[in-house]
């Protein structure tokens, strides 16, 4: 049997995200001194069931289908502050587009809601234009209490081929444009992975 025939008959190679592939990953894996660990920290997850980091309807698990690989990095600081980077690779560009479309629709459907664990807070989602990858959108929310803003979360979600990438931060005012650089960088980088673009 020829090698080409063997390759044709073998199952498709599973997609893997290489170690340190995400932009923030090297820093996230860096060992912190005990003093620094009290001031900041990272969590890294490769679970396919992690919900998207921009999650207007508050799903506890992933609701999108046909994920092939995923990595989510979240960071917290004592400032207080938080940020995240997430890469989800789907089995096809169609599946990634479907996830993107669903997320955009949920930002409208769940634009205003309250948190059952903190009923005094009102959550208001918004979207805005963004330019990265094949399609993208700025997205985020504010929490309000008694008419005053408590917290602002800014994010951007972009799709390139069969990959969806999300960046979020709690720093500053709502301004997805400042996250575009990372989204564009990753939109180029994911094309190095086989079959993504």
Image (cartoon, grey):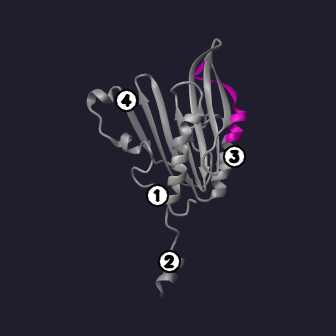
**Magenta stretch: residue 133 in it?**
no
Mark 3 Cα-neighbour bin, 10 Å: few <14, some 14–19, many ≥20: few
The residue where tag 4 is placed is: 40
Q: Secondary structure at mark 2?
A: helix
The residue where tag 1 is placed is: 16
Q: Earlier in the sequence, mark 4 or mark 1?
A: 1
The vertical placement of 12 against 56, above or below, is: below
The residue where tag 3 is placed is: 101
Q: Which circle marks residue 77 in the picture?
A: none
The residue where tag 2 is placed is: 7
Q: Secondary structure at mark 3?
A: helix
Please report the residue visible at 57 percent of the width from the left and 24 percent of the height from the top. Answer: 173
The vertical placement of 154 against 61, above or below, is: above
For the record, the magenta segment spans 104-120
Mark 1 Cα-neighbour bin, 10 Å: few <14, some 14–19, many ≥20: few
Percent position of residue 193, x then y? 50, 60
Please report the residue visible at 64 percent of the width from the left and 55 percent of the height from the top. Answer: 95
Q: CA distance from mark 3 to mark 4?
A: 34 Å
Q: Earlier in the sequence, mark 1 or mark 2?
A: 2
Please report the residue visible at 55 percent of the width from the left and 46 percent of the height from the top. Answer: 184
Q: Quadrant of the C terminus?
A: bottom right
The vertical placement of 118 against 94, above or below, is: above
């Amino acid at each position: 049997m020829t090698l080409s025939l063997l390759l044709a008959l073998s199952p498709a190679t599973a997609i893997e995200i290489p170690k340190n592939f995400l932009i923030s990953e090297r820093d996230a894996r860096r060992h912190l001194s005990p003093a620094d660990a009290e001031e900041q920290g990272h969590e890294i997850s490769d679970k396919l069931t992690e919900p998207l980091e921009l999650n207007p309807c508050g799903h506890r698990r992933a609701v999108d289908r046909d994920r092939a690989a995923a990595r989510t990095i979240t960071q917290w600081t004592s400032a207080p502050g938080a940020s995240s980077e997430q890469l989800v690779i789907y089995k096809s560009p169609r599946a990634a587009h479907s996830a993107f479309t669903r997320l955009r629709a949920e930002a409208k459907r769940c634009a205003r809601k309250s948190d059952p664990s903190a009923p005094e807070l009102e959550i208001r989602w918004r979207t805005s234009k963004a330019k990265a990858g094949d399609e993208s959108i700025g997205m985020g929310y504010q929490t309000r209490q008694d008419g005053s803003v408590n917290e602002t979360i800014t994010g951007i979600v972009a799709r390139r081929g069969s990959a969806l990438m999300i960046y979020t931060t709690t720093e500053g005012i709502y301004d997805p444009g400042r996250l575009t650089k990372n989204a564009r960088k990753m939109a180029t980088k994911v094309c190095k992975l086989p079959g993504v673009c």
